[in-house]
């Protein structure tokens, strides 16, 4: 079997499966899911700040922290504590809901 045919066969092995199945097979499902959650949370916080016209500097003042810490909150590459997220959410009139499934 030629190399081209083998590659085509490998690509077709995932046809019909879900993205979750593919990520699980690759061993990166949990990591990818965690990153996606962080992306969404950072986006939601940023959107809430924009809606209420709260700048990063103003948010830092409200949270009694530095602008750098606010940047960390809004960057999904960073890990943040639940208490930091709850405080930030409260400043924009939101709350954090976590569910174990």
Image (spheres, helix red, strand yellow):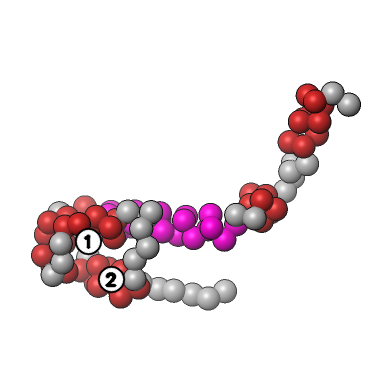
* Residue located beneath label 1 in the image: 69
Tell me if label 1 and label 2 are in contact, CB under 8 Å: yes
Q: In the image, is 34 to the left or to the right of 51?
A: right
On the question of residue 65 being in view, the answer is yes
Q: CA distance from mark 1 to mark 2?
A: 10 Å
Q: Which residues are magenta?
A: 29-49
Neighbours of disc 2 within 10 Å: few (<14), some (14-19), many (20+): some
Q: Residue 4's image quarter?
A: top right
Q: Residue at x 57, y 74 (%)?
A: 101
Question: Which image quadrant for residue 48?
Answer: bottom left
Q: Where does residue 19 sit, x and y in percent of width and height?
A: 64, 49
Q: Does residue 70 show up magenta in the picture?
A: no
Give yes or no for residue 47 being in the magenta stretch.
Answer: yes
User: Which residue does the image show at 72% across and 48% down from the upper left?
Assistant: 17
Query: Which circle's residue, 1 or 2, is located before the other in the chain?
Result: 1
Name the residue that disc number 2 marks. 84
Dot 2: element: helix
């Amino acid at each position: 079997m030629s190399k081209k045919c083998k590659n085509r066969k490998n690509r077709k092995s995932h046809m019909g499966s879900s993205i979750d199945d593919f990520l699980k097979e690759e061993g990166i499902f949990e990591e990818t899911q965690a990153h996606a959650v962080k992306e969404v949370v950072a986006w939601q916080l940023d959107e809430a700040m924009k809606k209420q016209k709260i700048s990063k500097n103003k948010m830092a003042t409200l949270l009694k922290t530095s602008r750098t810490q606010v940047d960390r909150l809004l960057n999904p590459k960073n890990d943040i504590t639940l208490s930091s997220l709850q405080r930030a959410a409260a400043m924009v009139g939101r709350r954090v809901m976590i569910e174990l499934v």
